Amino acid sequence: MARVVVDVMLKPEILDPQGQAVQRALPRLGFEGIADVRQGKRFELEVEGPADDAALARIREMAETFLANTVIEDFTVRVEAGS
Amino acid sequence: MTARIGVVTFPGTLDDRDTQRAVRVAGAEAVPLWHRDKDLKQVDAVVLPGGFSYGDYLRAGAISRFSPVMESVIAQAKDGMPVLGICNGFQVLTETHLLPGAMLRNESLHFVCREQKLRVENADTAWTTDYTAGQEISIPLKNIDGRYVADARTLDMLEAEGRVAFRYLTDGEAADGYGNPNGSLRDIAGITNEAGNVVGLMPHPEHAVEPLIGTGRTDGLGFFTSILKKLVNA
């Protein structure tokens, strides 16, 4: 079994009010010095079998069609170290 | 013979019964359609109603898009069958890419529920011929993922082709239903596809079809009478 991580983030030009709300809350909680926060989603996929090129290609296809909406979001796919 | 208009129920749909009622009030036959059933029962048009289909998990409308009923809806919409997506239904239509752009969390992060004023910009779609271009209407709006976004090129294309079907009216007091309620780009409340058969909007015409209910206005009825006329005259 291998673990593949798909990170999905709003594209840089898309307004992220949730990230902004988090950023605004930080100073109130005593966490200073954070200029910006962007909030995203992380998917951890346990792959049956090796995370080879074929498996990663399928996962990219999955991310493109389902996990991310590429109209508004970018995604990255990586194999988690040690898996 | 009257027109048969299908109303889809997904798990988590809320407004299917109101939509069926609106269809009947307009004089058409409402045909319930089930998300797991590919069979559209030979309806002449389909409405995707509001709610939180599949819990809005992942993204609003993202999972509904892959339901069996949507396979048929997408295929027939591409062949010209009229489809109206209201609220969550609009979100489903953007996820299917039958309509461009996407819906995101309201800029305010708050759920907004109120009477909303909008302008009908395009009275030539299958669902808007009983309005006149420029007509101002007031219907309920209730959403948290209602912020319409698209890239500048897409927005310019929509404007140039007259495909911004409805726009929020901002020139007035919020208490009177004016203002952009969710941060939608260019105050867009709803759009149409190129052919004019697929229309999506965030506000809820099906909640404004009878004088007895709500604010007493029937500004939403025109959606359902428009489609009925189109289908009966076809």
Image (cartoon, helix red, strand yellow):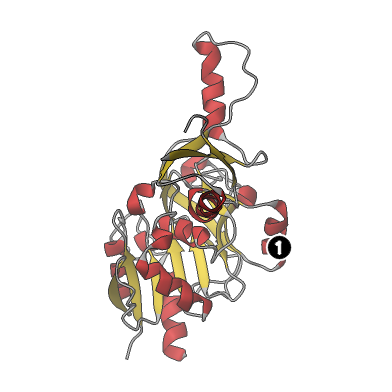
Q: Quadrant of residue B33?
A: bottom left
Residue at image coords 51%, 12%? A28
Report the front residue among B79 and B126: B79
Q: Is residue B207 above or below residue B226?
A: above
Residue B38 x/y as whole percent? 34, 74
Residue at image coords 36%, 69%? B69
Residue at image coords 54%, 48%? A56
Q: Is residue B169 above or below residue B198?
A: above
Apparent side of residue A33 relative to residue B233 in the rendered image (left or right): right
Residue A37 x/y as whole percent? 59, 26
Q: Can the viewer see residue B117?
A: yes
Q: Can the viewer see residue B137?
A: no
Name the quarter where the N terminus of chain B is drawn: bottom left
Residue B5 x/y as whole percent? 35, 77
Q: How many marks?
A: 1
The extreme top residue here reads A30
Residue type, numbered disc 1: Met
Q: Chain of mark 1?
A: B
Residue at image coords 43%, 61%? B65
Callout 1 crowding tier (Cα within 10 Å): few <14, some 14–19, many ≥20: few
Which element is circle 1 on?
helix
Residue B234 x/y as whole percent? 47, 90
Report the front residue among B161 and A74: A74
Q: Is residue B199 above or below residue A18?
A: below
The residue beneath circle 1 is: B157
Report the front residue among B17 and B114: B17
